[in-house]
Structures are given as structure tokens and as C-alpha cells.
Image (cartoon, rainbow, N blue to C red):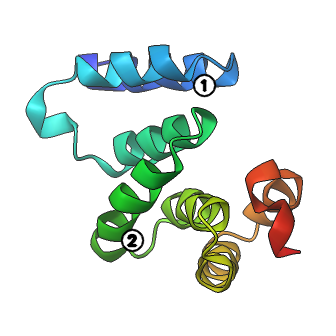
């Protein structure tokens, strides 16, 4: 296992434990070229959602949805940020697209507190 894969798995482990700040810091230590990997960006978005940094989620999500249009997780976390900042209709659109891209996310979305106002 290489250093980048190990760091991503470590960050994912921190997320499972609810330790978003530790996950974020783990990703900060990655080499510059690894910081733009889609999985790293997905984890960063999830960290920001856990930390309820909704404006940052929206800011980062705007660019990531364009750069990674097929990432269901980016769309899911972006939808959370949009919903939490009152942009409900946009949030619905991104949540629907996330579910279309990855149907397995549907149940997760129903349980996601940040999306509670969409359904």
C-alpha cells in the first residue's frame, strides 16, 4: 500500500469514528498532487458537512460539481450544503442527481439530517 492510499484509508477511518478534523488534517499532509484526487475531495466535502461548515461546502461544491460531474458523493454533500443555506430547490436537484448516479446513496440520503427539509 502506498503512502497516498494509506492516508486516504486513515482519513476514512477517522470519519467512521466521527473525527472529521483528524480526517481533514490527515489529508492536509498529502503531497500536493494527491490533494485533487476525487476520493480526497469527496472526503473533504464530507468533513466540512460533519463540521457544519455549510458556506465552505457550497463554495467548494460549486467548483467540484463542475470538475467531477459524475461524483455522486460530491453532489450529495453539495446538496447538504445547499439545503442548509436555504437553497432548497438546488439541493433537491443535486440530491436527485446523486441518487441517479449512485442508487445506493438513496437510503443514506433519507437518513441524512442535513437533507431532512427536502423530503
In the drawing, does residue 5 fall left or right of residue 13? left
Q: How many numbered marks does the figure carry?
A: 2
Q: Position of residue 39 (x, y in %)?
A: 40, 45
Question: Is the residue marked by circle 2 packed among few (<14), some (14-19), or many (20+) residues within 10 Å?
Answer: some
Q: Which corner quadrant holds the C terminus?
A: bottom right
Q: Position of residue 25 (x, y in %)?
A: 35, 17
Look at the numbered discs 2 and 1 and tell me whether their residues touch, using CB distance below 8 Å.
no
Residue 35's place in the image compared with 84, above or below, is above
In the drawing, does residue 38 fall left or right of residue 20? left
Residue 28's place in the image compared with 105, above or below, is above
Q: Position of residue 7 (x, y in %)?
A: 36, 19
Residue 36's place in the image compared with 83, above or below, is above
Query: If you read the primary sequence from the N terminus, does the residue marked by circle 2 or circle 1 appear first?
Result: 1
Q: Secondary structure at mark 2?
A: helix
Residue at 11% from the left image edge and 38% from the top image edge:
33
In the drawing, does residue 106 fall left or right of residue 42? right
Q: Nearer the viewer, residue 86 or 77?
A: 86
Question: Is the residue marked by circle 1 packed among few (<14), some (14-19), or many (20+) residues within 10 Å?
Answer: some
Q: Secondary structure at mark 1?
A: helix
Residue at 57% from the left image edge and 59% from the top image edge:
81
Q: Position of residue 14 (x, y in %)?
A: 57, 17
Q: Quadrant of residue 65?
A: bottom left
Q: Quadrant of residue 27?
A: top left
Residue 15's tag is: 1
Residue at 53% from the left image edge and 67% from the top image edge:
75
Residue 65's tag is: 2
Amino acid at each position: 500500500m502506498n503512502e497516498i492510499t494509506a492516508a486516504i484509508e486513515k482519513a476514512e477511518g477517522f470519519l467512521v469514528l466521527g473525527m472529521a478534523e483528524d480526517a481533514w488534517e490527515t489529508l492536509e499532509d498529502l503531497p500536493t498532487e494527491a490533494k485533487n484526487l476525487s476520493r480526497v475531495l469527496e472526503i473533504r466535502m464530507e468533513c466540512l458537512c460533519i463540521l457544519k461548515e455549510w458556506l465552505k461546502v457550497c463554495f467548494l461544491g460549486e467548483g467540484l460539481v463542475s470538475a467531477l460531474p459524475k461524483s455522486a458523493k460530491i453532489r450529495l454533500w453539495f446538496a447538504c450544503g445547499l439545503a442548509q443555506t436555504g437553497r432548497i430547490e438546488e439541493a433537491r436537484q443535486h440530491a436527485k442527481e446523486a441518487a441517479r448516479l449512485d442508487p445506493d446513496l438513496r437510503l443514506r440520503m433519507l437518513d441524512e439530517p442535513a437533507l431532512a427539509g427536502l423530503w
